[in-house]
């Protein structure tokens, strides 16, 4: 197990629970785009969750991919067998004591550990938590034949258990007095990031606004997974500026290493520094 690093944001503690890291061809992640000469041929993508411990609540932001998922069209996520649940417990997290699960969007590598396989069926992993996602995202997924595997193993079980509350992210709903959804569409139509504000300090949980830190210097780069590349770029630039201006610690969904860092302005653009 990698050494757990925790971050203090005001009165809140934030830490990462790793699922997997995997090497990915840079040109495959950013196809048919202009890459600068210093970009490596391969990059490492991390799949993980962020845990936020407030004085009163324990919150999970995104739940990675999950074990045993049938994803034949996505080899990186197909039939995983990782010690994610064990790592949760080693980090001092009892899944039964999690209060909230917040999803930035409903791609399979952000909702998988909503559930686990137990007693011959998919059941909620965080059985005492309230789960939250965009109601428009969910309605779209329910009508999309290509999303039915994700629905069946990662979302329908929490719906049937009565644990899922859908939200209008455009209203920027708040949770636990410190977390607020912020619409950042582009990667998906109803994608949202999450802002943490506690005791005058800020953090930004970016979801899939970016997949790798090379996008900080080159925000025009859109991953192959973005539904609307132009919209995603516009939201990236807005978020980078906001994070720099608020000295917010940026918690990424797919950067490797610590997966967290600070954005600063440099010349006409931005620069990344791992924390």
Image: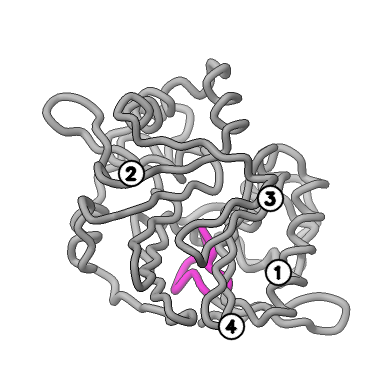
- Label at residue 74: none
Numbered disc 1: secondary structure:
helix
Classed neighbour count for the residue bearing mark 2: other residues with Cα under 10 Å, few (<14), some (14–19), many (≥20) = many
Position of residue 167 measured from the top left corner of the image (x, y, whole percent): 56, 40
Task: Find the distance from the CA under tag 4 to the CA under tag 3.
Answer: 22 Å
Marks 4 and 2: which is nearer the front? 4
Residue topped by disc 2: 113
Image vertical order of residue 34 relative to residue 110, above or below: below
Q: Earlier in the sequence, mark 4 or mark 2?
A: 2
Q: Is 202 or 37 nearer to us in this picture?
A: 202
Relative side of 54 to 171, left or right: left
Position of residue 53 measured from the top left corner of the image (x, y, whole percent): 36, 69
Q: Earlier in the sequence, mark 3 or mark 1?
A: 3
- Label at residue 200: 4
Q: Which residues are magenta?
A: 250-260
Classed neighbour count for the residue bearing mark 4: other residues with Cα under 10 Å, few (<14), some (14–19), many (≥20) = few
Marks 4 and 3: which is nearer the front? 4
Magenta stretch encompasses residue 189: no
Marks 2 and 1: which is nearer the front? 2
Marks 2 and 3: which is nearer the front? 3
Task: Find the distance from the CA under tag 1 to the CA under tag 4.
Answer: 25 Å
* Residue drawn where x is 37% and y is 40% of the image: 112
Numbered disc 2: secondary structure:
helix
Q: Are marks 4 and 3 in contact (CB under 8 Å)?
A: no
Magenta stretch encompasses residue 251: yes
* Residue drawn where x is 39% and y is 75% of the image: 13
Q: Is 199 or 79 nearer to us in this picture?
A: 199
């Amino acid at each position: 197990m990698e050494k757990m690093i925790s971050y203090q944001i005001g009165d809140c503690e934030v830490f990462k629970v790793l699922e997997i890291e995997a090497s990915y061809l840079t040109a495959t992640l950013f196809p048919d785009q202009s890459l600068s000469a210093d970009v490596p041929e391969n990059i490492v993508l991390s799949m993980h969750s962020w845990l936020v411990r407030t004085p009163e609540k324990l919150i999970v932001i995104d739940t990675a991919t999950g074990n045993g998922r049938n994803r034949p069209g996505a080899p990186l996520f197909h039939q995983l067998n990782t010690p994610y649940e064990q790592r949760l417990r080693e980090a001092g997290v009892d899944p039964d004591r999690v209060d909230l699960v917040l999803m930035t969007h409903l791609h399979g590598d952000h909702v998988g550990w909503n559930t686990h396989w137990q007693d011959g069926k998919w059941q909620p992993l965080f059985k005492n938590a309230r789960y939250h996602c965009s109601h428009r995202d969910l309605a779209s997924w329910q009508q999309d034949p290509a999303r039915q595997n994700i629905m069946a193993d990662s979302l329908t079980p929490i719906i049937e258990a009565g644990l899922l509350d859908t939200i209008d992210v455009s209203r920027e709903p708040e949770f636990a007095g410190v977390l607020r959804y912020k619409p950042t569409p582009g990667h998906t139509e109803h994608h949202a990031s999450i802002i943490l504000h506690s005791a005058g300090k800020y953090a930004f949980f970016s979801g899939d606004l970016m997949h790798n830190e090379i996008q900080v210097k080159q925000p025009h780069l859109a991953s192959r997974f973005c539904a609307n590349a132009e919209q995603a770029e516009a939201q990236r630039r807005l978020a980078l500026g906001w994070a720099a201006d608020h000295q917010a610690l940026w918690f990424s969904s797919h950067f490797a290493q610590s997966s967290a860092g600070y954005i600063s302005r440099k010349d006409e653009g931005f620069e990344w520094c791992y924390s």
